[in-house]
Amino acid sequence: MSDKKQFREPPCFISTARHDAHTVDLLNNLFKDSARGGYSDIHIEDTDEGAVIRRRHNGIMSEYSRISRAQSRDIQDKIRKKSSIPPSELQAPRDGRMFLEVDGRVVDIRVNIYPIRTGHSIVCRLLDQNNASRQLEEVEMTPDVRREIEKIMFGPEGMLLVSGPTGSGKTSTLYAALNKLNTPERKIITVEDPVEYRLEGLVQG
């Protein structure tokens, strides 16, 4: 099944009311610019004065824009609808998922919305499905580190612990390692929460 067949609705935010064109433009530009720029996540946080939009790139947060509380509510409504999070469930953390199309590729976005003192915090994690096929040789690391990883991967037993801040390359490293190990001669079972990318030939759970 191709990535585009995953879409059950238009692969972008769309206007559904007369007053929401500016919000739709902001959302589409925000997510497309973030995907093109390699940002790992987007944060929309209500404050006492309004709301702030921030993004993370290579583990470092930076401010994108400040908006009014009214526009923050409109943004939350749009994101809740697109990620199938009920608009009435406002008092507890909620998780969802949505897909956007950027330059012909699918961006898988994991959404978390949770209440805070000033309103809500929205965190959107951007996953580029093209990363699912990345090879270990394509992940930036020193030759010594790569040799140690491969030594553990192909050893008869052992454990590889990958840690670091958001956007540091943990997921890319682990999936690249799976791609290297994934051959017809092996059966591989994963335990993931959540499954970030779907790989053929593996049993993912």
Image (spheres, grey):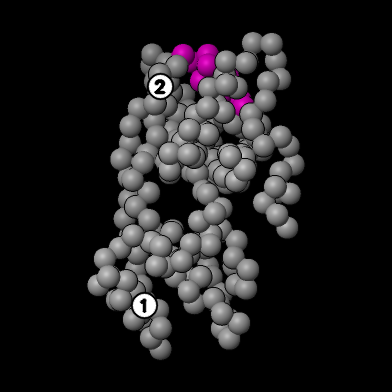
Looking at the rendering, in which quadrant would you find the C terminus? bottom right
In the rendering, at what x and y percent does residue 76 appear? 56, 26
Picture layout, residue 149 above or below residue 130: below
Viewer-nearest residue: 169 or 105: 105
Please name the predominant secondary structure of the magenta segment in the image.
helix
Viewer-nearest residue: 69 or 173: 173
Q: Quadrant of residue 49?
A: top left
Tell which circle, 2 or 1, labels the residue nearer the N-terminal end. Answer: 2
Picture layout, residue 137 above or below residue 5: below
Mark 1 crowd level (few <14, some 14–19, many ≥20, 10 Å Cα): some
- What's the residue type where badge 2 is placed? Ser
| Cβ–Cβ under 8 Å for marks 2 and 1 | no
Q: Is residue 69 inside the magenta stretch?
A: yes
Assign a secondary structure to mark 2.
strand
Q: In which quarter of the image is residue 177?
A: bottom left
On screen, residue 66 versus residue 30, left or right, reads: left
Q: Which mark is residue 65?
A: 2
In the rendering, at what x and y percent does residue 87 appear? 64, 29
Query: Which residue corresponds to mark 1?
Result: 150
Image point 53% across, 59% down: which residue? 132
Region in magenta:
68-78
Q: Is residue 77 visible?
A: yes
Image point 59% across, 31% down: which residue? 79
Q: How many angstroms separate mark 2 from mark 1 (CA)? A: 42 Å
In the rendering, at what x and y percent does residue 188 appear? 55, 77
Viewer-nearest residue: 120 or 53: 53
